[in-house]
Image (tube, rainbow, N blue to C red):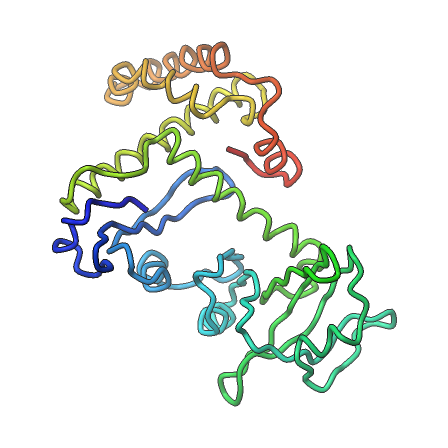
Amino acid sequence: MRRNTPRGRDALPGCAKGKAGAKWVQGYSIKTGLLEHGICDAETASETPLWHKLVPTFTSGVLYLFDLGFFERALFASAKAAGAHVLMRLKSTAKVKVVAHMSENGFAPLPGWSLAYFLSSVSRRRGTVFDLDVTWGKGKDMLSLRLVGYAHKATAIRWYLTTVPRSMLTARQVIQGYRLRWLIELLFRELKQTADLGRAFTADPHAVQALTYGAMLAHVLVRSVRIQAALANEIPLEQLRPLASLHVVRAFARELVDGLASSTRAEWHQLMTTVGDVLVGLARERKPSRSRQRIALKLGAIGA
């Protein structure tokens, strides 16, 4: 999100009183770590309608990870109808009924217990993994879903609601899969710290969009150069610090623009080699920060 000064509220009437700003919903590839889409509206606009504008339909066979800001039964219903899959945390206000659970002898049916009543009848010791069949809603709106839980301690169980069948992912794989969402949090940190995606001193929504697109383009450029340098030099991407990489790319800004405008690829390839060598020399951190190591190396995905 990029906030404007309060006087910008007239230009963005959907904003709350005394506040003004633009909210961005952005499409992000976990595989490449690059921003792929973006859509903007008033700060207080609901995220779900914005996301529907960005992604009008679910794609069959694709797993979508959401945070609790998108939690609604219709999202799960739409995904199931399209043959896609959804995974998100369970909202505490959702009234699900447990109809089966994993036991030593396989799945044991239950008569639609509440989650609280089910927990009163089973062990909740630390490290316990729960794998349940649940229903959500009533009548024609009722959905059959899967609920996976992990007990960090007896009084703290994290629940994950999903449409993913057990034939595709085990309960532990569901938990590990949801952790990939933390890569998005690292993206936000990188955008704010290295691409200056923060406050604006203008109330013009068009200027705000231009500044934000500029930050997004800077992120994609710097990240693409980092990926290229890491591949060319056969080193982990996490060892090339984002902020230091940004400074290197800024130093080659004119050359990069000229290289993109060049009529031949040879000049661009030579420039990438030069920039990559400088990145490795100035931005490499042989012992990267613990957060980048933990997310990227332990989860097997590209880190920040």
Near-viewer residue (41 or 115): 115
Residue furthest right in the image: 105
The quarter holding residue 85 reads bottom right
Rendered position, 164 above or below 41? below
**Residue 65: x %, y % from top left:** 51, 56
Tell me what residue is drawn at x 68 percent, y 61 percent: 157
**Residue 110: x %, y % from top left:** 74, 83
Residue furthest bottom in the image: 139
Q: Is residue 256 left or right of residue 172?
A: left
**Residue 139: x %, y % from top left:** 52, 90
Tell me what residue is drawn at x 34 percent, y 31 percent: 195
Near-viewer residue (234 or 68): 68
Tell me what residue is drawn at x 20 percent, y 42 percent: 208
Tell me what residue is drawn at x 23 percent, y 21 percent: 261
**Residue 260: x %, y % from top left:** 28, 22
Number of numbered discs on residues: 0
The quarter holding residue 123 reads bottom right
Q: Is residue 225 left or right of residue 234?
A: left
Rendered position, 190 above or below 29? above
Rendered position, 141 above or below 274? below
Near-viewer residue (198 or 234): 198
Q: Is residue 119 left or right of residue 14?
A: right
Rendered position, 230 above or below 153? above
Near-viewer residue (231 or 162): 162
